[in-house]
Structure formats: C-alpha cells, structure tokens
Amino acid sequence: MKINSHVFRLASLVLAVVVSGCQTDDVDEKGTKVLMIGNSFSISCLRHLPQIAADRSADLDLASLYIGGCSLEKHWGNVLSNDVNRAYKPYLFGRNRFGEYSQRKINVVEALRLAKWDVVTIQQASHASWKGETYHPYGDQLVAKIRELAPQAKIVVQETWSYTPWDKRLKKWGIDQNEQYAKLHQAYGDFAKQHGLEVIPFGTAVQEWRKRLPVKYTDHSFGGDVAGGRSRAKEDQFKRDANFNWVPNGDVFHLNERGEYFQALVWAAKLFKVDVSEVDYRPDFVTEDEAKLMREIAQELK
C-alpha cells in the first residue's frame, strides 16, 4: 500500500538547531512539515521512522526542538526568556528535509516562524506527566503561542509512557507503574480535550504491549518490556550489587531499541494515517512475532 506523497519521507535522526531571526525558509510545499517541541521522549521516535516512511513511500519534513527532560513549564519559560533576550537559544534543533540535514541553535519562537508547519507536537515531561495540575497554565500558554505564530498547524499531543518498576521515583511518589499510566492517561486526555487536540496514544500502546505480550518482570529481567535496558545486550541489562542482589545496569525508563521501533509505528499510524500493518521494514533486533504485535497495537489505536 502507498500513501499520498504529501504525507512524508524521512531519512534519519539528526539532532540540531537553527539560526536566530529567521523567517520562513520554505522553498517548496511538498511533504508534511512537522515540528516536535519535546525532549528525549519525542526524539526517540525518530530512530526508525525514516525506514517506516521509506517503506510507505511517503514524504516528511521533520524537525525537533530538544532539551532533555524539558517540561511544559520550562518550554514556556524559554518563550518568555526570548521576550527579553532574542539571542537566547537553548534548543538543539534537528531538521531532516528530504535527506538534507541542518544543525543549529534556536528558540521556540524562531522555530515556529521558520516554516509553515502542518503539525506541531507537544508533550509534558515524563516525570510530571501524571500530575494534571502541571499542565496549567504553561501548556495552555504554549498552545496559545503556537496558534498565534503557526495558525495553520495542527497541534498534536504525544502521550508519554509509564516507567518500569525499577525507577526509584515511583516509590518516592507513592505510585506504581499502572497508577502512573492511569494518571498520565487522564491528564493528557483532559488537557487535549480542553484545547481540542488529537493525542498520539503511545503511553496506551506501551501498556497494551505489557498486557498482551505479556511482559513478565523478574528480579534480573525487564521481561520483554519496550522500556528499560537501552543500549545493552540482554545479558548485560542487570548486574549484582555489593550485596549480590540483582540491580539494573543502566536506564530504567527510556525506551529501548525495540521500543523506539514501536513508537515510530504508533506515530506513523496515528499522525499520518499510515496502515502500519503493511509495513515490511523490521530491524534485526525485533522478531517477526514482536513486530506483528506492535503493528497490531499501533493500527488498533490509530
């Protein structure tokens, strides 16, 4: 199946940032132009979206505003900082325009004015996503600013995911993985409904994966989860501590490589209305059975 070439073509992830004082630099109108205002929970979807796009013969002009762990409050604070200092450029801005790459420093206002974006995505920082009160007033103000500077753009919210049980913040907050998901799902849904926005339901997709696989955590295994253990071989994801207890050997809340493939499928299915059940591309570290389940979930949530 092929989709309209107006949808997207993407090559590979590039983290970057653009020059200040720019007006729109559009030289053509092909493809869908997408700007992500996010953090590590948004740029991770780009690892495999290029190949999925190529698989679907689609066109995409994709850019990312990146600060690690950046919350809606911080994004809005950065906008306000530009009111008094236009030279303030805190973001790494990466843009892939049909295989042409750029890396520059930029701020939110400049990025919104840089192109006639078709879609602008936003999200709350994962550590605050389960607290509905943290979306206001900062998220409200950010939505208003996007509508002011990019009135043609559709604003879409990415629902982030809940952590693995090893993340110590869950105990600190007095909640477990399922409670974190339930609360963030409610918070994202309420925020999106208030502003009439669509949601990329990736947090829900992760929960469905955990339920359907099913994920079975052990004292020294992530049990097949799509979060935790990034960039480590399966046998190296846990280690013994000084008391000879098993503990995670690294990341316990970001997506792992399989999760990044899954995220790209959910984005493609929901945001660009791609039939991902027909995607042939599958990285070697994802089994055919895993890919089939990921495609099924992504297509169902479309």
Image (cartoon, rainbow, N blue to C red):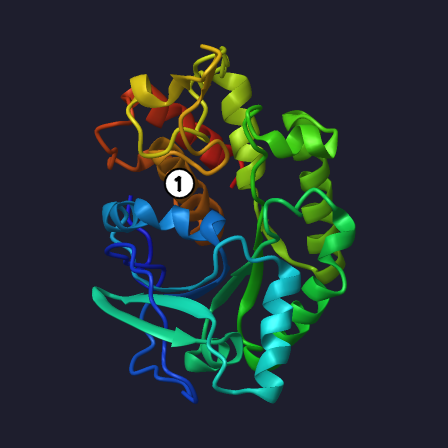
Task: Give the quarter of the image for residue 32.
Answer: bottom left
**137 in relation to 249, above or below:** below
Task: Give the quarter of the image for residue 173.
Answer: top right
Task: Give the quarter of the image for residue 148.
Answer: bottom right
Q: Measuring 44% from the left and 13% from the top, which residue is drawn there?
A: 220
Q: Which residue is farthest right?
A: 133
In the image, residue 138 lies at what x, y percent?
Answer: 70, 65
- Mark 1 Cα shell of 10 Å, populated few (<14), some (14-19), many (≥20): many
Q: Measuring 53% from the left and 40% from the top, which residue is drawn there?
A: 202
Residue that numbered label 1 is attached to: 265
In the image, residue 26 lies at what x, y percent?
Answer: 34, 81
Question: How many numbered marks does the figure carry?
Answer: 1
Q: Measuring 46% from the left and 36% from the top, which residue is drawn there?
A: 299
**302 in relation to 92, above or below:** above
* Left or right of residue 98: residue 289: right
In the image, residue 249 lies at what x, y percent?
Answer: 40, 26
**19 in relation to 188, above or below:** below
In the image, 104 versus 123, the foreground residue is 104
In the image, residue 210 lies at what x, y percent?
Answer: 52, 22
What element does badge 1 sit on? Answer: helix
Q: Measuring 50% from the left and 80% from the top, which residue is drawn there?
A: 88
- What type is the residue that disc 1 sits on? Leu
Q: Quadrant of the N terminus?
A: top left
* Left or right of residue 228: residue 6: left
**68 in relation to 239, above or below:** below
